Amino acid sequence: MTGGVGREAIEAAVARLDRAAVEHVPCAPVADLIGPSDIDAAYAVQSALTALRVSRGARVVGRKIGLTSPAVQRQVGVDRPDFGVLFDDMNYASGATVPFGRLLQPRAEAEIAFILAADIVDPQPAAVRAAVGSAVAAIEVVDSRVADWRIRITDTVADNASSGVFVLGDRHLTLDEFTPADVSMRMLRNGVTASTGTGRACLGDPLSALAWLARTALDFGDPLRGGDIVLSGALGPLAPIEPGDVIQAEVGPLGPVTATFEKEG
């Protein structure tokens, strides 16, 4: 049992989301199986799905923080942050072409990615800051296995925080070289501004988002580790993606990051 949710319900949610991912067909919400508010049950589903992906050859390379921007929370109808797992096969370099066929209902957001130089076993702000080796601009593509994005908080948590792929920029800066809360962001879709924001849109400061994740990861007994990539959360509203789109983002002194989305077949 997890809270009031039985093991059978959790296993049914795992099977539903895994089938949607493997068959590439969106599914019904899993909140109807595990309830709309049992966060522990939702993370139990996420953990089981992570184990499945690892058993099939994927490698965990970090974490993502989701739902840090009030604008994004309003867009997807939830009211708190969450986190998910980043896998090696989700990672693209700036300028890469991402096969659109691997995605279902993609939306892009621009953010700061932190590269950790040390484990975070103390979630106090000074220790969190000291653990950051560098930061880069990032485009995260969120996606949902739940049809039409009809998600509650338990749906997105169970579905690995609605993860898709991510694209990292080339310019690495240390925290002595810039202040994450002060960055400005502009994201373009096919040359037209699609989203703007600042570092303060991410829980007031992307480093505060990182500290939230560090505390939460410790609570789950799986602390952040040196070498991890951490996507710290959106700096502005999401933008939908269609086949052939080019998404570009400028994230303050971290500079540009770009991805093209190509339809397979």
Image (cartoon, helix red, strand yellow):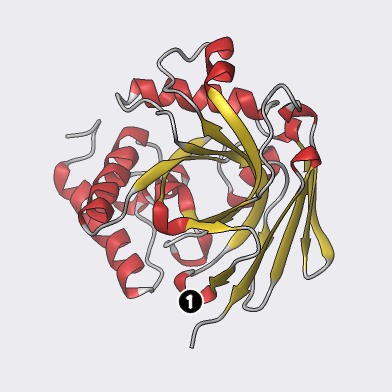
- Name the residue type under label 1: Gly
Is residue 260 visible in the rendered structure shown here? yes
Residue at the spot of label 1: 101
Left or right placement of residue 149 versus residue 73 in this view:
left
Is residue 80 visible in the rendered structure shown here? no
Q: Is residue 109 above or below residue 38?
A: below
Q: Residue at x 40, y 28 (%)?
A: 225
Residue 235: quadrant of the picture: top right
Q: Residue at x 58, y 47 (%)?
A: 77
Task: Report the front residue among 94 and 197.
Answer: 94
Q: Is residue 136 above or below residue 93?
A: above
Callout count: 1
Q: What x and y, as percent, mark residue 231?
A: 55, 41
Mark 1, secondary structure of its residue: helix
Q: What x and y, as percent, mark residue 98?
A: 55, 69
Q: What x and y, as percent, mark residue 196?
A: 81, 48
Considering every residue shown, the one lying at the far bottom of the view is 265
Considering every residue shown, the one lying at the far right of the view is 192
Task: Report the front residue among 189 and 254.
Answer: 254
Left or right placement of residue 173 versus residue 105 in this view:
right
Q: Residue at x 23, y 54 (%)?
A: 52
Q: Residue at x 34, y 67 (%)?
A: 20
Task: Report the front residue among 194 and 10.
Answer: 194
Q: Is residue 34 above or below residue 225?
A: below
Left or right placement of residue 34 versus residue 71 in this view:
left
Residue 187: quadrant of the picture: bottom right
Within 10 angstroms of label 1, few (less than 14), some, or many (20 or more) residues? few
Image quarter where the N terminus lies is: top left
Q: What x and y, as percent, mark residue 212?
A: 52, 24
